[in-house]
Image: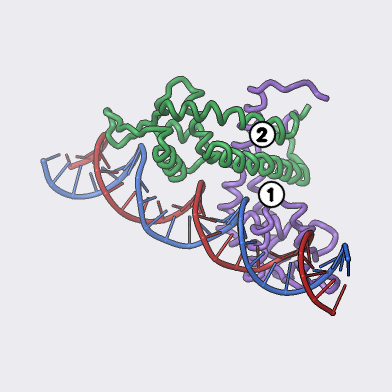
Chain colours: A purple, B green, C blue, D red
Amino acid sequence: MPPMERETDLVERWRALLSSYNEVACHLERVLGEAHGITLSEYETLDRLTTQKCDKRRMQDLAETMYLSQSALSRTVSRLVKNELVERTHCEDDRRGVFVEITETGRERWAEARKTHLAVLAEHLSPAPG
Amino acid sequence: MPPMERETDLVERWRALLSSYNEVACHLERVLGEAHGITLSEYETLDRLTTQKCDKRRMQDLAETMYLSQSALSRTVSRLVKNELVERTHCEDDRRGVFVEITETGRERWAEARKTHLAVLAEHLSPAPG
DNA sequence: GAACATTAGATGCGCACGCATCTAATGTCT
DNA sequence: AGACATTAGATGCGTGCGCATCTAATGTTC
């Protein structure tokens, strides 16, 4: 068991996290919206679908690797479907399940957005500690 | 000028930040709400008002040390006023300005919430790097 | 001092979120 | 097979957010 961290250090670390997060998230949200018409959550969802092996994932699997609540993810996917960046298909084995599959348009949009994403990170994510 | 950071490292650091933030923020939001009837932004606002020298600050000064947009801060203060944790007073010098002052009730509420806040940080904020 | 620009903060609006609940499919137990 | 519990995901609802705009006070210029 590690030694107890001092309260002030704990709070300071949280403060730092909070402001770093907001600095980056705010910019990402705005820029992704303006330049590509997607939200940060939508980008992250597309990213999960391209980065990982298969382009097709169950909602549950997707949820596991994400920070969103189940309902928020469901709605995020709905928006992506509406914009034709993703498709929902029913799962054969378990008909309650839903597969999410990225479309060709989705893949293109993601590729464009990725550049913007990296640029924002490079500009606003504070340098690595150490 | 530091050497260019590799793209994957940049993204990884952002991912880590994103998930750490959400882990902590979600719990804080929920627990502060249930146990003390305040939001995270409200707690942070009270915290600014007690931690820093004076208990009385202009909206602008407050905004500077916070991550909230101007409008969000304005509404946060409105909620605090409604719950009698804070008072708005007009600034004499510049009558457009507004002072925000913590009340006795506000100070008490903050003191209680602080314990909860620390407990959540201790439990959910991942240990310091290094 | 009248016209215009700027500034501090409040507010209308639309949106993404989490929580609770709902629906439909699957598992379980007798 | 029939009754009940559980699970996957969708949806109603209320809330806090950012952006754009509004109002009122202050500064500026002629």
Tell me which corner region of the image, top left, top right, bottom left or bottom right, holds residue A32. Answer: bottom right
Alpha carbon separation for disc pair 1 and 2? 32 Å
Q: What residue do we see at 75% from left, 40% from top? A: B5
Q: What residue do we see at 65% from left, 53% from top? A: A116
**Which image quarter holds the C terminus of chain B?**
top right
| A67 vs A128, nearest the viewer | A67
Q: What residue do we see at 67% from left, 62% from top? A: A74
- Label 2, on which residue? B120
Q: Nearer the viewer, mark 1 or mark 2?
A: 2
Q: Position of residue B107 (x, y in %)?
A: 47, 26
Q: Position of residue A55 (x, y in %)?
A: 80, 64
Left or right: A79, with B52 as reference point: right
State the SS at label 1. Answer: helix
- Label 1, on which residue? A118
Q: Is residue A54 above or below residue B31?
A: below
Left or right: C17, with D16 as reference point: right
